[in-house]
Image (cartoon, rainbow, N blue to C red):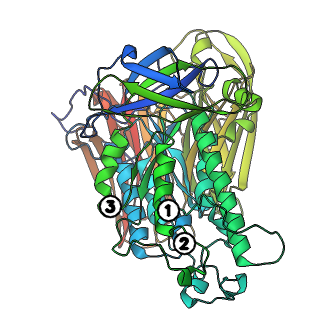
């Protein structure tokens, strides 16, 4: 079916702001060479009501490094504002763009770490902590600004984590679907109270949850933080925050039992694990300091009426320091050491999430001359104060001088090929990229379905407008997001001719086709240009089961005329009647067509509704039609094709939605686009 909207009159409004558009990394980002000539400090100054204090200058700060005053050589105040969405424009927050770019927004980089590993401790295995972890995770996502990049990371069930994205719905889904309940056998020995000569043995249970293959020694709660901080080490000078939602970890500062590697005595095993956690905690402090990462802690267990240490009889005479106090002090220490704040023993901690994240939205970025250029790897104490009375100054407490290897990682320009560009936690940005993924039924492959991957490659700004020939290597790979295993890949080696004139000559599109079974995948694309620079872009795709699902849709294709340069031009010619594009910014002189294929039960009555919505939430046009059973000659399969009235649209952002119903089943596809 092919149709055209009849635009509703009088509903076109010019927009004064574009909400949700990706912000390019511009000159507003402070440019420090952190860890080399200068120590970079993110400094939050809060008043008595914990509101950020504005208006300070470099002369208002005094910085001591190892007790000696060090000059502030670079200074900038940074405010990350949340744009105000037009009234009623809920879809602009709820519907993520179907095209993802590798342009890095200029906001914060936030890792929401849900410490499900801490739930296996014997005194926190309760549903209250599980519920609070989800509530706090959702609250943290709600407080993110549009230009923040965020990830959801689980310490024990790490395979359920969600990589960095601006798509809030992906973050919510990760929080809701993750299994947070502790292992039912983890605390068996604790509840039985089995003891042997005052010492719990491996055979009688695991009261501390240290013999779990998925979280050996219970150290995953700490080691995950170190890995995240290390992954953020080479990022540019953005505010990097870990929101740590945990029931706390007991790390005893004392060594109470001499460790012996011989035998299986549980007491010795527990002490060995305590030493491992001590070392992991020291490593977190170091990695967070080098990467300038702030950790904000939230106590998922809250205020407990019987907040006391287990008795010796309860825990087998091992924990003599008071387990509850240790877990709380852990949360406090890991935040305060990195310049953050801990919210503990509070059953209404959801109310604290907003001020906790707002504290990181306005800060002062100080570049302080390092006291030494010697790469000794040692910790140097830092103290920052201001003459402003009645305020609280928060920043990290120490500076770790990098080792030679750490310095190399912090200052060296990353090199490598297209495959190497896909290995980082965040995509590389040296080559501007866009990606759009479209699932479709594919009877020609054993999997029964395939994924169309459209990658837009733009000539980098510093060479844009220059006529040049260049060989480009592109790798497109789909991964199982839970195992990290590659499940399909395609490579292209292209000789490109960039032209010096014309609006579209600095961009082309590469079309890949990956046969995939039904399921969820992470798709990564790596690009290596002829001059050695590399880029990458990441997205996610859900491939329906076109054989078993009662109602399923292909991806929603947008096609534009004039057609962008695309290779290979015939990649999808046998499965769709037009060539998809990853372009989502159109001119009013363009011709834009939307298309999809639907799969439904035979003889089921149904309708197709296409709706065009503006950024003001006004329905510009709407068309509902009864499904034609004869479409395509197959009563179970049909096509829908419609021209979008772009020539009648005012500049701004729009949402096109296609909803299909068949009996009691409904499915929809969305695409966002912009009229310039």
Task: Check if mark 3's residue and mark 1's residue have beta carbons within 8 Å.
Answer: no
Q: Is residue 103 in sight in this rendering? A: no
Tag 2, which secondary structure? loop
Say above or below: 91 vs 537.
below
Residue at mark 2 to residue at mark 1: CA–CA distance: 10 Å
The residue where tag 2 is placed is: 121
**Mark 1 crowdedness (10 Å alpha carbons): few <14, some 14-19, many ≥20:** many
Residue indicated by mark 1? 327
Residue at left offset 32%, top offset 57%:
349
The residue that appears at 62% across and 56% down in the rendered structure is 481
| Residue 44 placement, left or right of 314 | left
Residue 241 in the image: x percent, y percent?
A: 48, 41
Which is more toward the observer, 161 or 280? 280
Q: Compare marks 3 and 2 and give the one earlier in the sequence.
A: 2
Image quadrant assignment for residue 268 = bottom right
Rendering coords of residue 537 (x, y %):
60, 38
Name of the residue lying farthest toward the left: 10
Asked if marks 2 and 1 touch (Cβ < 8 Å), the reply is: yes
Q: Which residue is mark 3?
A: 346
């Amino acid at each position: 079916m092919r149709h055209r909207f009849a635009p509703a009159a009088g509903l076109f409004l010019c927009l004064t702001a574009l909400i949700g558009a990706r912000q390019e990394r511009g000159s507003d980002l402070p440019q420090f060479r952190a860890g080399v000539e200068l120590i970079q400090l993110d400094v939050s100054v809060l008043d008595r009501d914990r509101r950020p204090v504005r208006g300070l200058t470099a002369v208002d700060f005094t910085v001591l490094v190892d007790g000696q005053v060090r000059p502030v050589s670079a200074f900038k105040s940074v405010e990350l504002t949340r744009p105000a969405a037009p009234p009623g424009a809920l879809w602009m927050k709820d519907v993520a763009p179907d095209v993802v770019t590798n342009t890095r927004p200029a906001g914060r980089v936030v890792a929401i770490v849900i410490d499900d590993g801490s739930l296996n401790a014997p005194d926190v295995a309760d549903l209250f902590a599980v519920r609070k972890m989800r509530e706090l995770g959702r609250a943290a996502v709600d407080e993110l600004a549009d230009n923040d990049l965020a990830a959801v990371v689980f310490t024990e069930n790490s395979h359920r984590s969600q990589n960095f994205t601006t798509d809030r719905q992906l973050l919510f889904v990760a929080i809701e679907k993750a299994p947070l309940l502790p292992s039912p056998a983890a605390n068996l020995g604790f509840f039985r109270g089995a003891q042997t000569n005052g010492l719990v043995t491996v055979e009688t249970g695991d009261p501390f949850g240290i013999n779990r293959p998925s979280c050996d020694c219970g150290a995953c709660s700490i080691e995950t933080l170190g890995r995240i901080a290390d992954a953020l080490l080479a990022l540019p000078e953005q505010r990097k925050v870990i929101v740590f939602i945990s029931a706390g970890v007991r790390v005893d500062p004392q060594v109470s039992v001499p460790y012996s590697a011989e035998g299986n005595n549980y007491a010795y095993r527990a002490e060995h694990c305590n030493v491992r956690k001590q070392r992991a905690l020291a490593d977190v402090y170091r990695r967070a300091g080098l990467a300038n990462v702030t950790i904000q802690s939230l106590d998922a267990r809250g205020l407990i009426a019987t907040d006391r240490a287990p008795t010796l009889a309860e825990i087998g005479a091992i924990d003599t320091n008071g387990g509850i106090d240790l877990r709380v002090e852990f949360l406090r220490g890991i935040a305060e050491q990195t310049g953050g704040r801990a919210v503990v023993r509070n059953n209404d901690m959801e109310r604290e999430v907003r001020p906790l994240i707002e504290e990181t939205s306005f800060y002062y970025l100080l570049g302080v001359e390092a006291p030494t250029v010697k790469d000794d790897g040692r910790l140097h104490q830092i103290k920052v104060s201001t003459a402003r009375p009645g305020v609280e100054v928060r920043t990290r407490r120490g500076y770790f001088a990098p080792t030679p290897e750490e310095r190399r990682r912090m200052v060296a320009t990353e090199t490598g090929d297209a495959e190497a560009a896909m290995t980082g936690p965040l995509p590389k940005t040296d080559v501007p990229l866009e990606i759009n993924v479209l699932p479709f039924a594919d009877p020609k492959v054993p999997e029964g379905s395939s994924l169309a991957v459209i990658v837009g490659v733009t000539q980098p700004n510093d060479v844009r407008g220059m006529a040049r020939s260049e060989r480009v290597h592109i790798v497109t790979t789909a991964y199982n997001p839970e195992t990290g295993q590659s499940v399909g890949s395609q490579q292209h080696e292209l000789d490109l001719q960039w032209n010096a004139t014309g609006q579209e000559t600095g961009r082309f599109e590469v079309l890949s086709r990956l046969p995939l079974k039904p399921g969820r995948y992470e798709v990564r694309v790596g690009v290596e240009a002829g001059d050695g620079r590399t880029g990458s872009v990441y997205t996610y795709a859900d491939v329906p089961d076109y054989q078993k699902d009662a109602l399923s849709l292909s991806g929603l294709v947008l096609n534009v005329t004039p057609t962008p340069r695309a290779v290979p031009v015939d990649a999808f010619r046998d499965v769709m009647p037009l060539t998809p594009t990853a372009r989502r910014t159109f001119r009013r002189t363009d011709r834009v067509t939307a298309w999809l294929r639907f799969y439904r039960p035979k003889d089921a009555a149904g309708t197709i509704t296409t709706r065009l919505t503006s950024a003001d939430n006004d329905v510009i046009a709407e068309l509902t039609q009864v499904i034609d059973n004869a479409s395509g000659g197959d009563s179970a399969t049909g096509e829908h094709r419609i021209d979008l009235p772009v020539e009648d649209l005012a500049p701004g952002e729009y949402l096109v939605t296609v909803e299909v119903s068949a009996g009691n089943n409904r499915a929809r596809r969305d695409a966002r686009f912009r009229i310039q």
